[in-house]
Amino acid sequence: MEQISLSTKFFSNRDLFKLFLPLIIEQFLEYLVGLADSIMVAFVGESAVSGVSLVDFVMALLISLFAALSTGGAVVAGQYLGKKETEKSREAANQLVWFAGIASAIIMLLIYFAKPFILNDLFGHISDDVRRDANTYLMITALSIPFLALYNAGAAIFRTMGNSKLPMKVMLIMNIVHAAGNAVLIYGLHYGVEGVAIPTLISRIAAAVIIIAMLLNKKQSLHLKCSLRHRFNWPVLKKILGIGVPYGLENGLFYFGRIVVLSLVATFGTAAIAANAVSGTIVMFQVLPGIAIGLGLTVVISRCVGAGDYVQAKYYTKKIMRIVYVTQVISCVVVLALLPLILQVYGLSDTATFMTKKNVWYHGIFMIFIWPLAYTLPITFRASGDAKFPMAVGSLSMLFCRIALAYLFDIYFHMGMFGTWVAMFIDWIAKAAIFIYRYISGKWMQFRTI
């Protein structure tokens, strides 16, 4: 590959460090609150853990949709910045925030309308206690959906400007409010599931208000217009949705597939549901660096592609992939070393503890070798405008690997809940192989967004 001189690089090592470190800290804080939530809910009981975890899968689906939309906005705004067209980049940022706010409000109403289906049909056969706790948690946290969308959009805009430190600070404030609220309501006032749901709602509202207020500052290069009047710029919005919709569909099908698999897990009893939920929370710390750095990779590649410099796009893809591998080895070792202590804090039953330990160890082993190729590499495709291919691969892999094989392993091979995790590992391997071929072929460099 053509060598790049230090004077022409878009991002120095210092620039990448300043971009990635706040992202890792931000994601760590976010997942830390999730871990604290699950530990505090475990204080209430296993039915509460199960009920909250079921709803969190639905919320994770929505968060992934907002993240996908925000990625679309970040790609378009980033490519315009790469072309030195700041005004068009600012317009893309404004279109993203307005569309995210309106679309998320509609989604919130649909969630309330679909509540009976979610609790009675989507989650499958669950006990009355689990259903009651899930209903309580859903009723409160669904109100936070528009604020989640606005925060995601605002954070993506700041990252596009190269400022990942501010979203990190907002996340820190959000998590302090969240953790303090949980502690007071659960341990102090002895609330049940409400003790987790109410602080979640308040902290998400606070995060959205803070970050949108910051974007209204005209000193920001990509600031928002301070007006309640808005006209959708459909050509710009079409470009944003051209990235966001395929990625959103991919994420949506991914999480819908997880919910389908979760309904299978629910048939194995409360201990299996709790173990699956706790495992899912813990393993997020293993992949945390990859997820965080992936947000920064979108900024880097979109800037390179906007400038028409695919030599640098390939250079930074390889460089950042190496960074992801190194950091995830470190995160995996730390998580596995702390696993006995974490499980002791949870205080789960012996059966649930054993299943959780097994899931986390196997996840760590497969994650170190396969995960970056399945999840970090396709970010380069989306940032270049090649969003439909990862969507097609991810959707088909979810259907034929993660869902079909989960039922095959669990029902016919009697592998129980662990069979769903084995199916997930095979899903990673299939996607990794296809994405490697796509990258080497260079077809992703033939797409244009702006």
Image (spheres, rainbow, N blue to C red):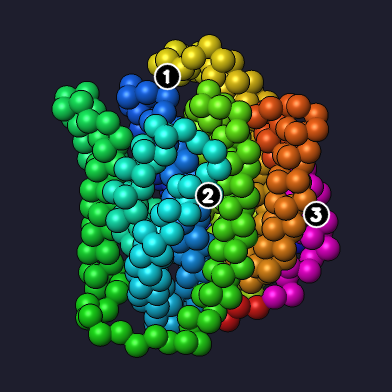
Amino acid type of disc 3? Ile
Q: Name the residue under label 1.
A: 346
In percent of width and height, residue 83 lies at 53, 78
Q: Earlier in the sequence, mark 2 or mark 3?
A: 2
Kindly indicate the quadrant of the structure image that contains residue 3: bottom right
Q: Name the residue under label 3.
A: 434
Secondary structure beneath dot 2 equals helix
Q: Please tell me whether mark 1 or mark 3 is closer to you in this view.
A: 1
**Nearest to the observer: residue 115 or residue 415:** 115
Picture quarter with the C terminus: bottom right
**Nearest to the observer: residue 105 or residue 374:** 105
Secondary structure beneath dot 1 equals helix
In percent of width and height, residue 373 lies at 71, 46
Q: Residue at x 42, y 24 (%)?
A: 46
**Dot 3: within a 10 Å radius of its alpha carbon, few (fewer than 14), some, or many (20 or more) residues?**
some
**In this orientation, does residue 98 appear?**
yes
Q: Which residue is drawn at 57% across and 58% down?
A: 252
234, above or below 410, in the image:
below
**Nearest to the observer: residue 111 or residue 60:** 111
Q: Residue at x 48, y 80 (%)?
A: 237
Q: Which of marks 2 and 1 is nearer the N terminus?
A: 2
Does 190 appear in magenta? no
Q: Please tell me whether mark 2 or mark 1 is closer to you in this view.
A: 2
